[in-house]
Image (cartoon, rainbow, N blue to C red):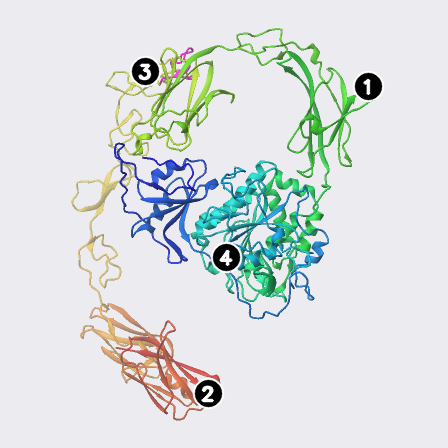
Amino acid sequence: MVVPLMDLRNFETMVCKPQFALLVAVLCFTVSLFGQISTDETPYIEHEILVMLANDVQPDKVLTELAEDVDFQILSVPSPSTNIYLVHVDGSNWAEALGKFKSHRHVRAAQLNHLVSERETVPNDPNFGQQWHHVESGDHDIDSDLAWDVTTGGVAGNGARIVVAVLEGGGSNYSHTDLIDNHWTNPGEVPDNGIDDDNNGYVDDYNGWNVGGNNDNIAGGGHGTSVSGMIGATGNNGTGGAGVNWDVDIMQVDMAGGLSESNVIAAYEYPKTLRDQFNATGGAEGAFVVATNASWGIDQANPANYPTWCAYYDELGISGILNCGATANQAWNIDNVGDMPTGCSSDYMVSVTATNENDVRTFSGYGVESIDLGAPGEQVYLPSGSSNYGNTSGTSFASPCVAGAIALVYSVPCPDLAELAIANPQGAADLVLGYIYDGVDLVPNLLTEVATGGRLNVANSVNLAMAGCGPVDCSIESFTATAECVYDMGADTVLTIATLDASFSNFLCAADIVCYKDSAAEDWTCELTELLGEDLSNSSALTLAGLMPNTTYEVFFSLDTLVSDTIAFSTPDCSALVPGCTDPDALNYDESATLDNGGCEYPCTDVVLTITTDCWPEEVGWIIVSESGDELAGVAPETYETDEAEEVWEGCLVNGCHVLTITDEYGDGMFGSQWGSCDVDGDYVFTTAEGAVIVAMGDPDYGDGISHDFCLPFEPGCADSSACNFDNEATVNDGSCYFVGDACDDGNEQTILDEYSAECDCIGVTAVLGCTSEAACNFSPEVNVDDESCFFVGDACDDGDEDTVFDAYTSDCECAGVPAIEGCLDETACNFNAEANVDDASCFYVAQGAIAGAQTATDMTTETYSYNGNPEYTYDWAVTGGSIQGESSGVGLLSVDVMWSSTGNGLVTITETDTTGCSGDVSIEVDLLVNSIGELEMMGMALYPNPVQDVLILSTEDATLGLEWVELVDVRGQVVRAWPAVDVRINLDVQDLAAGFYTLRISLEGGMLATAPVVIQR
């Protein structure tokens, strides 16, 4: 079954896998899911997932499909306008449902329901000062006093009350003596009557909204009280201090029921709903919410794990709402560690850090990518309790400082900004945000810490808004007039009109007055453009009607003090035109007509479209469009209402070529049977009135839509004029066309390459087998069928002579070989035969043995090297980096002693010569290390033996400097042994360490460090 989702704010709805229709109980079961919780997830509510569905889908259908794989309950709908659902998933593997939700094609985002926490740093210096953030002697303030010279807040330039929403987990004491006058109440709601008086979806939301309680009971939290006071503690009333705004409406939204992510989204939904209502009614209803404040969040949260939450800020921005967020109260680089919500990349999340009265960020987060600006937030003097004030610190109070500044900018006496906020809410928000960012005071230490490089200066922002206020700087870039004759069907007469087009330097520019006259007349006719019912602007042309035919006119326009050039245009002789049907193909064509009256009638064909619905008829729509793009017929979605019913449309469509498009809003075509709650698929068929099928459904799963081209009248046949069998009467191809060169069958088994000729006859050619490759020795130009008999120069063959090898076709296409000569073919062998071409396995070699000996040695040491060669051969040794010991110098010996005398790369080579004089070399490379004794000798120390197996001895008896400690470091830089320097002879036990290269580090007095390489051998 499918549970209807009528108002999910008031119901806990169970969504289950659809089962048999006759069952009273619905069995939901857990399926095997996939997906895991990331290790960097911040705290969340177990078993709860936020799911954001795509726009323009039916939620009940998507949720039913999801229930095919996951058992869940819908707990709430935090944001109905953006299809965000909070669901509960049972079972120990509940978190694996995330993967199923994320992979669904109609799910925009899915995530855990994270916990958030308030941010407030307990002050440690309560007597620091009072409201320095407004005015401070070092000018580290926001210059509130200068901004107040222009505005103290309250209303926009069009008189609309400005609203800032404060979202708090514990509410705010709006009854505080310095806040009550600026408390927002809903003017469209009657309190406590149980009725949604303003139809905004919230019942009795008079004092704001409590998300957890679904009422307007706002708790009196102290945190929210100070936040509200920063935005708008009443000014100039002789009580307490002042907010950034003396006068502003503060909307309270209480996230009671826990600071979960779903509550956060539901809290934002309330001011968004009120602003959307304001926008839709031109300010008559709802609330002019320009900013929200979030003085809470999740430390070190990865924004990638919160796609729903972050995406919601873009939705708020579209509504015209800027959203301030307090970043972490820790000196973290948010670009690296993350934060929510201030790590979100949305342009409409304004991320704020805190500064003190010296313009220094001391305790709070930063990041040139994540954090936008700084604002006062350390030891700021704000309301507390019911009538008190006190000093407090935290980004919690820097963020509302910016939110208050946004509201103050909206209150500048600028009607243009106020009107733009209604006409283009997002555009106005972008404009104000630019004033905030462009107005900051650049602060040296913030240049590398926040995106703007500065701290809020509300006076600068207010002045920027005033500088950008009207009159708009307009210039006229072009002005043209075009006259024409049009037929007025209602009056059955020909009218003479002119269309005026103009372009301006600014999109806000538009003509106020248009003046025109007959060139021969003296008096001008001037009219206000608003009375003409059209704008003359970049986006709108203006029409002058009631003009005289065959007349020259002059016209100009003005806006404010700007006047356009006067231009002239001439009207055609419309009085001489005869209205009627001017299309020769029409049934009512009028040869005398010189102006088409739009009344042409054309031959048409009676057709029938029959649609059989599945279980979701409301999803289906269709449209028939002509070749020129005109809509001929159609039915919009949400029209059909009956399941499994035939919906029939009959009409007479004008003859010609058209397109029939069948659509489905959900995107699953008419494939109803894929759902457990539906037993049938839909269908459609488009026919002539006589029953000839023009179009029929193929696959019911046609997605969002499918289009079919067709032509009327419906005459099947070959309709392609380039085909051999073109039928001039056919209007639709039936697949019977064939063309010159198309393959065919002439019925003769002795012919090949049968195809249609220019006369449309099927003709083949006689088959001739042979070699068809021109490069082959046996190519024949008469052949047309290759029988794979080709052979080429160089191809292997057999010349029949057993005494030859490498038989191949020559350039004369003759098969010939070369005489066979046996011998050793390996150039490295002692008996290599350059004349041989057949290997007889007779090769023999010398220097095939190996040298044994140390491959790592220390200079000034002696190592023995031996070779496992034939004693009957002669040998000669050579050494690089050392010398051979003994009088023989290694001549004729299978073993030598080598004294190494250098460091770096050494080489031991033996030359072996057999009794035939064939010789070869064998070598071994040796890594030669610095002798520790020699390296440390200058410091009066000795290190031996090196290489070492068990115990390394460090002698410091004659050391010139005192030792502090000794340690051994491996090749990774890790200390693997450490010894105290307590004796002049230090035994360094290394017997349990792995063989390899190490470094001995010796700390000497005075901060000096001596090192020596150590080789451990096994």
The span from disc 4 to disc 1 (Cα, nearest Å) is: 73 Å
Q: Residue furthest front?
A: 193
Is residue 795 depicted above or below 221 in this figure?
Answer: above
Boundaries of the magenta span? 720-734
Instruction: Assign a secondary structure to mark 4.
Output: strand
The span from disc 3 to disc 4 (Cα, nearest Å) is: 83 Å
Looking at this view, is 947 or 491 the one in front? 491
At label 2, the amino acid type is Glu
Report whether 962 appears left or right of 511. Answer: left
Closer to the chain start, of discs 1 and 2, is: 1
* Mark 2–mark 4 CB contact (< 8 Å): no
* Mark 1–mark 3 CB contact (< 8 Å): no
At label 3, the amino acid type is Cys
Residue pointed to by mark 4: 296
Report whether 688 appears left or right of 200. Answer: left
Instruction: Assign a secondary structure to mark 2.
Output: helix
Residue pointed to by mark 1: 520
Residue beneath the point at 68% across and 55% down: 459
> Viewer-nearest of labels 3 and 4?
4
Closer to the chain start, of discs 2 and 4, is: 4
Closer to the chain start, of discs 2 and 3, is: 3
Quadrant containing the N terminus in the rendered view: top left
Closer to the chain start, of discs 3 and 4, is: 4
> Viewer-nearest of labels 2 and 4?
4
At label 4, the amino acid type is Trp
Q: Quadrant of residue 473?
A: top right
